[in-house]
């Protein structure tokens, strides 16, 4: 069975009958785990194995950035926020870049060893002290530092065997509102955005495997949020930046997506704008509505692009725990937490 264009979530820590029904739907192409799906490393591995048994070809994802956004916390490395790398960058640029590569490798290695394909990382937003939802999830307030640290982090993920997703194109750092609960607007000109926020995406477009656009309306550029905008996704990202990877929508249940209408309308707008896969999370009725609409619309997903997001290397959990590089990086991170 091929992958459909919808990524959805699961109800709990084990598969329910409704979960299985949704997983078996041909319009489903991926699953994302949240904190409510996680009790322990052993349980997560069993849950992932159960999903694979139903649909082995699905993309299995998580948000494991570190800091505030780390869905799995017990039994794995407690990752610092990416802003700590920015702090090191100000003191020792070369050491910070090396550390960013190590952190990307370790995070990816742990998630692959659990059976996941991707973590939606890294955040490439430039933090300017305005956005509470981004904040220390960003590497730095200087686009060049975000480029250098982001490149190293992605290279570490690639070395581990995981595809990387840059978010939130073209940049979420300027807006104050949280797109989870509001509809953020950015009043700046296209030139201001291109010469500042968009720089990491432009520099890393050839290295990234996927991009996730922001649920932000850039008022001077387009009346639609970036994730529903053919201008942002096609004219700029695909044509100007020559990005050829996967475009994932951000979660369509977020308030920043509500301007488009109901869930099927949001899915249609995102796919029409250029998204390859749409996320509908934390709303089972919304997911069912999108599945029903996709069945009627007969929309197919780009299999070649999506296949590139699958895990590129099998990592054995027990063997990873004994690997010298893993132990050294984890020890250095644990020391940071003790300081």
Image (cartoon, helix red, strand yellow):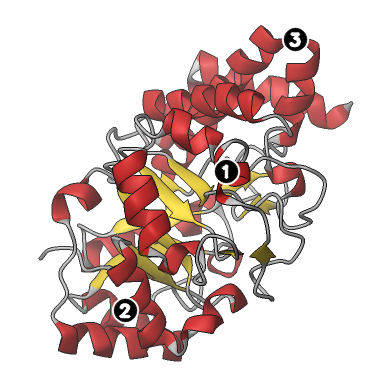
Tell me the residue at 63%/53% (across/down). 172
Q: Judging from the image, what secondary structure is the residue with disc 2 in?
A: helix
- Tell me how far mark 3 sits from mark 1, CA to CA: 31 Å
- Identify residue for label 1: 191
Mark 1 touching mark 2, by CB under 8 A? no
The x and y percentages for residue 15 are: 39, 75
Q: Nearer the viewer, mark 1 or mark 2?
A: 1
Whether residue 16 is situated above or below residue 166 in the rendered picture: below
- Of 223 and 107, nearer the camera is 223
- Identify residue for label 2: 268
Picture disc at residue 323: none
Tell me the residue at 71%/26% (across/down). 85
Question: In the rendered view of the protein, which quadrant contains the N terminus?
Answer: bottom left
Quarter of the rendering containing residue 3: bottom left
Whether residue 336 is situated above or below residue 324 in the rendered picture: below
Picture disc at residue 92: 3
- Of 178 and 83, nearer the camera is 178
Quarter of the rendering containing residue 317: top left
Mark 3 and mark 1 lie on one chain; the one further toward the N terminus is 3
Mark 3 touching mark 2, by CB under 8 A? no
Classify mark 1: residues with Cα within 10 Å, few (<14), some (14-19) or many (20+): few
Q: Judging from the image, what secondary structure is the residue with disc 1 in?
A: helix
Left or right of 144 on screen, residue 161: left
């Amino acid at each position: 069975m091929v992958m459909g264009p919808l990524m959805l979530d699961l109800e709990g820590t084990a598969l329910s009958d409704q979960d299985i029904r949704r997983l078996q739907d041909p319009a489903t192409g991926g699953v994302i785990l949240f904190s409510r799906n996680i009790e322990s490393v052993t349980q997560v591995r069993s849950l992932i194995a159960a999903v694979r048994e139903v649909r082995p070809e699905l993309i299995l994802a998580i948000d494991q950035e570190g800091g505030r956004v780390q869905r799995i916390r017990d039994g794995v490395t407690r990752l610092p926020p990416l802003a700590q790398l920015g702090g090191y960058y100000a003191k020792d640029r070369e050491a910070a870049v090396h550390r960013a590569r190590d952190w990307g490798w370790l995070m990816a290695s742990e998630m692959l060893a659990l059976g996941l394909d991707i973590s939606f990382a890294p955040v490439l937003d430039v933090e300017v002290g305005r956005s509470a939802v981004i904040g220390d999830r960003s590497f730095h307030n200087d686009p060049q530092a975000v480029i250098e640290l982001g490149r190293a982090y992605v290279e570490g993920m690639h070395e581990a065997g995981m595809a990387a997703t840059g978010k939130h194109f073209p940049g979420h750092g300027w807006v104050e509102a949280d797109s989870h609960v509001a509809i953020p607007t950015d009043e700046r000109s296209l030139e201001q955005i291109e010469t500042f926020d968009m720089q990491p995406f432009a520099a890393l477009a050839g290295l990234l495997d996927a991009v996730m656009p922001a649920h932000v309306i850039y008022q001077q550029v387009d009346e639609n949020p970036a994730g529903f905008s053919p201008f942002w996704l096609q004219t700029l990202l695909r044509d100007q930046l020559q990005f050829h990877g996967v475009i994932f929508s951000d979660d369509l249940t977020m308030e920043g997506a509500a301007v488009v209408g109901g869930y099927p309308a949001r899915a249609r707008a995102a796919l029409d704008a250029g998204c390859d896969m749409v996320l509908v999370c934390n709303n089972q009725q919304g997911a069912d509505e999108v599945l029903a609409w996709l069945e009627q619309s007969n929309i197919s997903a780009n299999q070649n692009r999506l296949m590139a997001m699958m895990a590129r290397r099998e990592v054995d959990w027990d063997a990873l725990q004994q690997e010298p590089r893993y132990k050294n990086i984890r020890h250095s991170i644990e020391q940071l937490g003790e300081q």
